[in-house]
Image (cartoon, rainbow, N blue to C red):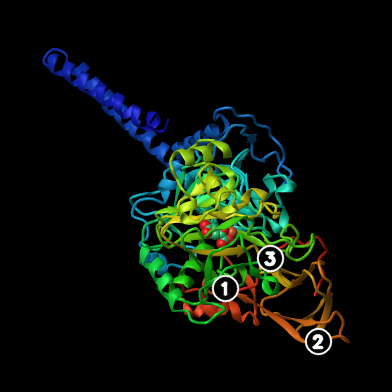
């Protein structure tokens, strides 16, 4: 429409002009006065056309047309159903049109947002020195595809965290969405049902399909697919069709190439990670491990169970070591957190990096990484503040000649076959695979596991590749489909590293704090103690008892200091447990974020200073575990 309005008159004028000129030369001697009249007419029509074009440009009907086009396009897309309702904020019937897509497949149409991140993106050096979330990943070769800055509305598909089906399509006015980073989350949160956990103050964090956390509405384009993550949960990578690959350019990889996250299975949720790690880094980890001499962290027979109850287990026959501080291990741990969207890095949210060695026949029978616990205890990750193992990343440090896969018995084989146990066993026998020759007895759990490894979802170890899977469901409970094991090594040696990442402090949080900023700039702090009573002091003044499981919420200001002491009354006041000071993050001027910095969290800060990769300042190291306060707000 833009072209017909502006270009058509001049095009028509051009044609008229040549035919009139032709006529005028033919009739030049006899009909000069009439031809002169035609010339005037011609000039007049040129001037008029130019005037119309100028007016059109000044009053920008093209812009209006484009906006209308955008709007109509979003309304009349295939299979649309829409309804008009009132704006929750203003009460006017301004609220976007909404439709539910029954058959939308999020893997379709990801080309455009992916393309936005392709091309000559930042180099490894750029990524290392970039602020934590580099804002602009596009460059001149890959400008945003739509002139979305000019559209007044954005059509967006909203998905629940970890879900890849049944998005809600909303069309939201850009001005409301873009007023501040907070209105972005709040506006989208207001579009979805309460059960999404995105309402009001605890509105959700917003992620793109490539794991990018959206903090600025300029990062969005029309038709973007967004995943909404409740504040007290962590982002779960969405699964696409098996084999679908997503490029991740905002996480520094080992080799400067973009990390590739490839969907292997939707349930269990399993992904292969490419370009995540390098061969040199793998060699470094192995060399460091072989040099560890102390009996606790050096290579030793693996155990199962936790703490004092840990013991050798005939169903886990590997050896393992703990790499607490080699440069490669620190880099890898940060990279894993970054890829999982858990930022800033939280050392206390993972067991250490475990280095595994499986010699011939060694294996780990199928198991859950999620630790057993009494229901409702602090390791019950389904309750606020509870935490347990959330995701596992296994990085392969060597190729393995045969065997050694990571197997998921609840998942379908990657080759698409659906063999029964009996069929797989028969096939193995017909191929003359003699397990007995290497010491695996008929009828043993190792033999059963080998058969499962040949009939179920099994990821082959390839040096410097990794596998990511989730042990928790989006709502926080254990995912029983996450059952997995390390297949017996049938030839060669398997080295691997794994990190069990929790959704909070390892073994659950004793106490957490979170601060939220309202639209008007006022601040609210929330404290929660999950399993033990404490007392909360504001400066030197006793403020309140922190009863276990009962959130405490209050208004506060920049610079306030809170202390948590043992004991729930002034009389019982015991040891100082933590101090939280409100600080503004100086390096994030665009988003005024406040965080509490627990002064006693030395563990977190420890390897933070060791790591040359990042340049976050210590103000970002925070105990900012979130939850949704149900209680009223106390005035301070
Ligand atoms: O070795 C593997 O492939 C899996 C290891 C594992 O599941 C674990 O250590 O928890
Ligand atoms: Fe495991």
Q: Secondary structure at mark 1?
A: helix
Say whether residue 586 is left or right of residue 29: right
Residue closest to the eye, 503 or 265: 265
Report x, y in % for residue 394. 51, 59
Say whether residue 133 is left or right of residue 172: left
Report x, y in % for residue 72. 54, 32
Disc number placed over residue 516 in the picture, else none: 3
Q: Dot 2, crowdedness within 10 Å: few (<14), some or many (≥20)?
A: some
Q: Secondary structure at mark 2?
A: loop
Residue shown at 26% from the left, 25% from the top = 42
Mark closest to the chain's N terminus, 3 or 2:
3
Mark closest to the chain's N terminus, 2 or 1:
2
Residue shown at 41% from the left, 33% from the top = 2
Q: Which residue is mark 1?
A: 620
Please say if 606 is above or below 224.
below
Q: Quadrant of ligand 2?
A: bottom right
* Residue 191 picture quarter: top right
Report x, y in % for residue 512. 71, 71
Are dots 2 and 1 in contact, CB under 8 Å? no
From the image, which quarter does the N terminus lie in? top left
Please say if 213 is above or below 551.
above
Task: Residue 161: tell me if it is visible.
Answer: no
Q: Nearer the viewer, mark 3 or mark 2?
A: 2
Residue closest to the eye, 603 or 311: 311
Q: Dot 1, crowdedness within 10 Å: few (<14), some or many (≥20)?
A: many
From the image, which quarter does the C terminus lie in? bottom right
Q: Dot 3, crowdedness within 10 Å: few (<14), some or many (≥20)?
A: many
Say whether residue 118 is left or right of residue 597: left
Residue closest to the eye, 494 or 457: 494
Q: Which residue is mark 2?
A: 574
Please say if 37 is above or below 99.
above
Report x, y in % for residue 40. 26, 25
């Amino acid at each position: 429409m833009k072209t017909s309005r502006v270009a058509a008159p001049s095009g028509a004028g051009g044609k008229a002009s040549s035919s009139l000129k032709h006529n005028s030369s033919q009739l030049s001697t006899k009909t000069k006065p009439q031809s002169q009249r035609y010339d005037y007419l011609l000039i007049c029509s040129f001037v008029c056309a130019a005037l119309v074009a100028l007016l059109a440009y000044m009053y920008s009907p093209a812009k209006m047309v484009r906006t209308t086009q955008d709007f109509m396009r979003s309304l009349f897309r295939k299979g649309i159903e829409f309804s008009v309702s009132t704006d929750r904020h203003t009460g006017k019937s301004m609220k976007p049109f909404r439709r539910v897509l029954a058959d939308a497949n999020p893997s379709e149409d990801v080309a455009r947002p992916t393309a936005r991140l392709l091309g000559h993106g930042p180099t490894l050096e750029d990524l290392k020195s970039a602020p934590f979330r580099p804002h602009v990943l596009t460059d001149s070769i890959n400008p945003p595809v739509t002139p979305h800055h000019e559209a007044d509305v954005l059509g967006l598909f909203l998905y629940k965290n970890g879900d890849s089906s049944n998005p809600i399509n909303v069309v939201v006015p850009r001005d409301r969405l873009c007023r501040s980073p907070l209105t972005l989350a709040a506006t989208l949160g207001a579009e979805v049902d309460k059960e999404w956990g995105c309402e009001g103050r605890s509105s959700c964090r917003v992620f793109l399909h490539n794991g990018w956390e959206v903090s600025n509405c300029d990062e969005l384009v029309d038709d973007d697919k967004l995943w909404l993550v409740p504040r007290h949960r962590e982002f779960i990578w969405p699964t696409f069709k098996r084999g679908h690959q997503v490029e991740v350019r905002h996480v520094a990889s080992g080799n400067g190439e973009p990390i590739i996250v490839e969907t292997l299975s939707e349930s269990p949720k399993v992904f292969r990670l490419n370009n995540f790690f390098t061969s040199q880094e793998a060699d470094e980890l192995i060399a460091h491990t072989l040099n560890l001499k102390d009996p606790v962290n050096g290579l030793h027979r693996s155990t199962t169970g936790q703490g004092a109850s840990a013991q050798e287990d005939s169903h886990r026959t590997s050896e393992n070591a703990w790499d607490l501080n080699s440069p490669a291990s620190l880099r890898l741990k940060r990279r894993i957190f970054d890829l999982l969207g858990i930022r800033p890095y939280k050392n206390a949210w993972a067991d250490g990096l475990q280095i595994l060695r499986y010699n011939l026949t060694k294996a780990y029978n199928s198991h859950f990484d999620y630790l057993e616990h009494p229901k409702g205890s602090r390791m019950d990750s389904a309750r606020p503040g509870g935490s347990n193992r959330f995701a596992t990343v296994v990085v392969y440090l060597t190729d393995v000649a045969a065997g050694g896969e990571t197997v998921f018995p609840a998942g379908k084989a990657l080759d698409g076959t659906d063999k029964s146990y009996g069929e797989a066993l028969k096939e193995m026998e017909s191929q003359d695979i003699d397990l007995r020759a290497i010491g695996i007895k008929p009828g043993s759990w190792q033999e059963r596991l080998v058969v499962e490894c040949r009939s179920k979802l099994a990821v082959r170890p390839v040096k410097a590749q990794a596998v990511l899977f989730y042990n928790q469901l989006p709502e926080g409970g254990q995912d029983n489909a996450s059952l997995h094991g390390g297949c017996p090594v049938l030839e060669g040696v398997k080295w691997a590293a794994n990190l069990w990442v929790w959704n909070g402090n390892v073994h659950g949080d004793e106490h957490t704090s979170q601060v939220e900023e309202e639209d008007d700039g006022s601040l609210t702090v929330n404290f929660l103690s999950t399993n033990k009573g404490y007392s909360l002091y504001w400066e030197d003044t006793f403020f309140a008892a922190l009863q276990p499981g009962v959130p405490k919420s209050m208004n506060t200001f920049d610079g306030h200091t809170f202390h948590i002491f043992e004991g729930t009354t002034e009389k019982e006041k015991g040891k100082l447990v933590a101090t939280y000071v409100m600080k503004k993050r100086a390096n994030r001027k665009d988003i005024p974020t406040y965080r509490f910095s627990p002064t006693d969290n030395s563990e977190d800060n420890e390897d933070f200073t060791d790591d040359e990769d990042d340049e976050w300042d210590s103000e970002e190291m925070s105990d900012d575990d979130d939850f949704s306060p149900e209680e009223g707000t106390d005035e301070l």
